Amino acid sequence: MARYIFITGGVVSSLGKGLMAASLAALLQARGYKVRIRKFDPYLNVDPGTMSPYQHGEVYVTDDGAETDLDLGHYERFTGVSAHQNDNITSGRVYRDIITKERRGDYLGATVQVIPHVTDAIKEFALQDQGDHDFILCEIGGTVGDIESLPFIEAIRQLRNELPQEETCLIHVTLVPYLSAAGELKTKPTQHSVRELTSLGVQPNVLLTRCEHPLPEGERRKIALFCNVRREAVIPALDASSIYAVPQQYHDEGLDREVLRHFGMLDQSRAPDMARWEDVVDRFENPEGEVTIGVVGKYVGLPDAYKSLNEALVHGGMANRTKVNIRWIDAEVFEQDEGDILSQLEPLHAILVPGGFGERGSEGKIASIRFARERKVPFLGICLGMQMACIEGARNMANIPTASSTEFGETPEPVVGIITEWMSEEGLQQRSADTDMGGTMRLGAYQANLAGNSHVSQIYGGATEISERHRHRYEVNSAYKEKLEEGGLIFSGMSPDGLLPEIVERPDHPWFVGVQFHPELKSRPFDPHPLFSGFIAAALAQSRLV
Ligand code: GLN
């Protein structure tokens, strides 16, 4: 049976619990253990799929088509373990399932209550599908003390009574703020937060204390004393030089050691093999080149909205030992002032138009794609970015001046249109314009077949079949394939049935690729995605030209 590690947060949000969970999992993995990480989100949306990126950051899509919290991206990137549908649960999903059962009459006349029905559903979720994992880490979103997280904490309390005592561990992540006027780190918020947790019947075993200054021994002992944990189990967590340095840093502070000691496994555990992390940190911290990439998008005000993209670009940099500066450009500015296009795009070594939804900013994206095409600047278009590359090609190279996407309203030339039918592993999927918005896009991993002599097949190391993750409602309309090809765009990747365009490229351009899927979701620091390694290599070549 798997051992469970629960991770809660206290004092404030944004303490980096997700990164902490991912780093601990990476450390346990480096000691040879098999790990899996799950996220419990207390909000009432069934999944984050319908939330604005400004509310919740990026929506991370799994191979099996779940729209999940962006922390699952951290988990995958740090462990290489692919997440599944059942690795992320929200209060909304728990309540939806319970209410469906209630309407069906499954509760046989019982009053349906938070305890036991909601807590049972949460426990069931935590315990399902343990496989042969040594550890299952469960991160609870939100902050202890929030109303929404109460049922989750209660479920943990019950689980800790029901499972053998030595098989669960609770790590509470808190903040030890520095008061500059007093010149001191303050432990009181941590004490209060732990008191809140213990008042709910849950005693933490390890405290990870985020602090901006080293935690003096006296403060460490004080936290241990007041919070009822061993001194060694108070792990100071200072800001790291980069996220890739976090696993090593937490190891140096004793995090994995304390967790294993808690489980009584320290003596039989081998030391972690940190070679892959050392290599990643070395590549990140000692680059030999530098490039500047422009990302022309809509949600540029919030870096979390493009979390995986940002990471994948950095991974591409690591593959080339190159520092990647990302310039986030709001596509809308190009719509107001054309002169801006030249001044903003000319200094760039490559241009990327990422995924997105809605018409706002689309003309600016199309203008920047035109710039990349005409000036032969390396270009990568992802999902909406690929669709815009096809509209740009249609308008300016294939003589279809009114080309557009039906996502932006009715158009006489729907070069991009709604997908109404496609094959998935579950069989034929059918949609119409009035289908519900939640969970109904083309989601998850799909195969694409690559044209043998294409640029992309070379980028993918000669592969002819690839599998990548999708999240979109619209699709390039293959009725326009011939005309677009006459305009110089080659369809070098197609769905296996030959109906859905997956990749376009321009053979008359040094590096111009548009993909209907999201390659950034599968890039990992120790295994950079080939499209990003190739894109950064092309940017590096471009930087030597300008
Ligand atoms: N809005 C587009 C669609 O639904 C693109 C989606 C995306 O970029 N993820 O097809």
Image (tube, rainbow, N blue to C red):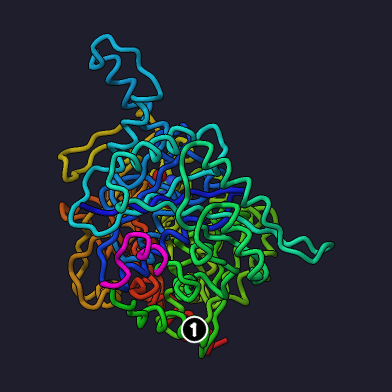
Residue 323 visible here: yes
Between 342 and 225, the one nearer to me in the picture: 225
Instruction: Assign the C terminus to one quadrant of the image.
Output: bottom right
Horizontal and vertical percent for residue 191?
A: 62, 50
Q: Quadrant of residue 49?
A: top left
Frontmost residue, 117 versus 156: 156
**Which residue type does callout 1 highlight?**
Thr
Residue 234: image x %, image y %? 53, 62
- Decide if residue 415 is in sight here: no
Q: Label 1: which residue? A: 322
Q: Quadrant of residue 439?
A: top left
Q: Based on the picture, tell me whether residue 236 belongs to the magenta stretch.
A: no
Q: Is residue 361 above or below residue 541?
A: above
Q: Is residue 237 above or below residue 332?
A: below
Q: Crowdedness of circle 1 by 10 Å Cα count: few (<14), some, many (20+)?
A: many
The part of the chain drawn in magenta is 257-268
Q: Is residue 260 magenta?
A: yes
Asked if residue 118 is positioned above or below residue 538 in the image, the reply reads above
Identified at 66% across, 50% down, the residue is 189
In the current view of this chain or complex, which residue is farthest to the top?
Answer: 109
**Between 292 and 47, the one nearer to me in the picture:** 47
Task: Give the vertical position of 186 relative to 315 (above or below).
Answer: above
| Residue 358 rendering spot, x and y as whole percentages | 50, 43
At a point 35% along the width and 40% down the height, the residue shown is: 418
Secondary structure at numbered mark 1? strand
Report the residue at 34% width, 51% height from top.
168
Q: Nearer the viewer, residue 141 or 84?
A: 141
